[in-house]
Amino acid sequence: MARRATKIVATLGPASSDPVMLEQMIRAGVNVVRLNFSHGKAQDHIDRARMVREAAQRAGREVAIMADLQGPKIRVGKFAENKIFLEPGQRFVLDAARTELGDIHAVGLDYKSLPQEVKAGDILLLNDGLIVLTVDEVAGSQVITTVKLGGELSNNKGINKQGGGLTAPALTAKDMEDIRTAMSFQADYVAVSFPKNATDMEMARQLCNVAAAEFNHKPGMIAKIERAEAIPRLQEILLASDGIMVARGDLAVEVGNATVPALQKRMIRMAREHDKVVITATQMMESMITNPVPTRAEVSDVANAVLDGTDAVMLSAETASGKFPLETVIEMANICREAESSEQVQLDADFTGKTFERIDQSIAMGALFTAFHMGAKAIVALTDSGSTALWMSRHRIHVPIYALTPKVATQRRMALYRNVRPLLMSTSSDRDTALADAENHLKTRGIVQSGDIYAITCGEPMGAPGGTNMLKICKVS
């Protein structure tokens, strides 16, 4: 089967929490498993993380674990009958002081600051924009509205303000507790919900590093771009993170559906230019929650994200609670492979007018350029931190990149990098031994055979992080 460069992130849930099913999904192509901290207790996540590690080991693959924080609960409260039906034109009150269960006239709020943050004329979107309310007036704790677009409203549905402007902090007390839980099993990535600026990401990183210090671990930080306020500050958020998630659900509700496709392309391009990773998420294969095949539009959506250059495409409810979690992963992997086969490689154009100040970055670029023009079978990076492999993965090239590292944490982290296959290999401190070991490693796995040419990068002295300073072109004897 042809290699796939684009990675697949799958969300764990009731449909995929069986160890046998999870192992099958990893074998079918899951590279990163997302634990959604909006659901479940701390112990559930600890148990699931252990199950992921065990399933990956049985499948002979290393996968990354991403802990996705819930973020602020900007939601309505609960209803006496679990749901109501709102008619257009009716009056409906959102009441921050209400303690009893909601009814057809009013409901309480999880987000107590809402009355201070809205005014007459504002448009509120509930349940991902399926319900639209116009604010008539704010009276004390009550936001009095008229239903513009009605429909069914059930417990704890989300609230967005059109155009953005709700000030809830990105990290709640629950998130801080969840960070401690995620670091107890050394989650490889932490996704932060609703960051508004670089400070939110820096604070999250600090909390993660403190919680993980006893394990000598540092997770990658992913900023979920889902607020209107985040768009003008995209660059600063990006620079404070290791990657971003194009979280198209909440983002579409705040900025409008029509704005999102162009934003997606811009975000993917920016992430690649700044040597960051990017995940495209939300409703990618939505119909496969209930159907065994995707719609043509979903196939195009996934393929477009791949052609834009995303590192990973993400499945949410499709694998968490859908009827066909395994089939969805198989379909998604096939779409990615097919889209990649038609990609244009523009490596020469990528390097035009570029200057590199760092030796290790220059070596990474030199390896790409040489391997591409010589038709090499593989590019191999001996890497301690994974930086060399990350830089290489920012450019489209149909030559597979194999990253050999002695560190399991680095191997797992690289599971998210596009076109990088991370492998574990203890590295000798002697350069010639290390290079010979690397070639044997590749031969044993059937990656290269006699007569093949490959490019390999490493650093001297061996094992010094950030020390990649050598490129060698080898022919397998």
Image (cartoon, rainbow, N blue to C red):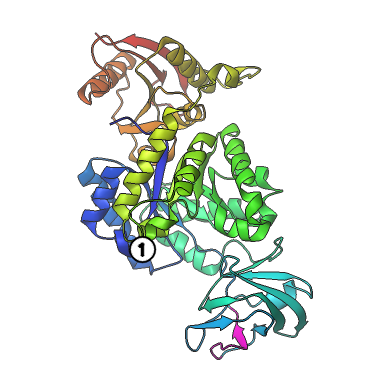
- Label 1 belongs to which residue? 321
41 is higher (above) or lower (below) than 115: above
The answer to whether any part of residue 206 appears in the image is yes
Residue 182 in sight: no
Q: Position of residue 50 (x, y in %)?
A: 28, 56
Residue pictured at 51% horizontal, 19% vertical: 365
> Does the magenta portion include 103?
yes
Magenta-drawn stretch contains 397: no
Quadrant containing the N terminus is top left
Q: Residue 473 in the image: x percent, y percent? A: 38, 10
Q: Main secondary structure of the magenta part?
A: loop
What's drawn in magenta, residue-wise?
100-109
Can you give x and y, in whole percent of width and height, for residue 183 in the image? Answer: 41, 55
Three-letter code for the amino acid on which mark 1 is drawn: Ser
Q: What is the quadrant of residue 29 in the picture?
A: top left
Q: Is residue 471 left or right of residue 99?
A: left
**Residue at 26%, 43% in the rendered image:** 27
Nearest the eye: 207 or 363: 363
Q: Position of residue 462 (x, y in %)?
A: 38, 22
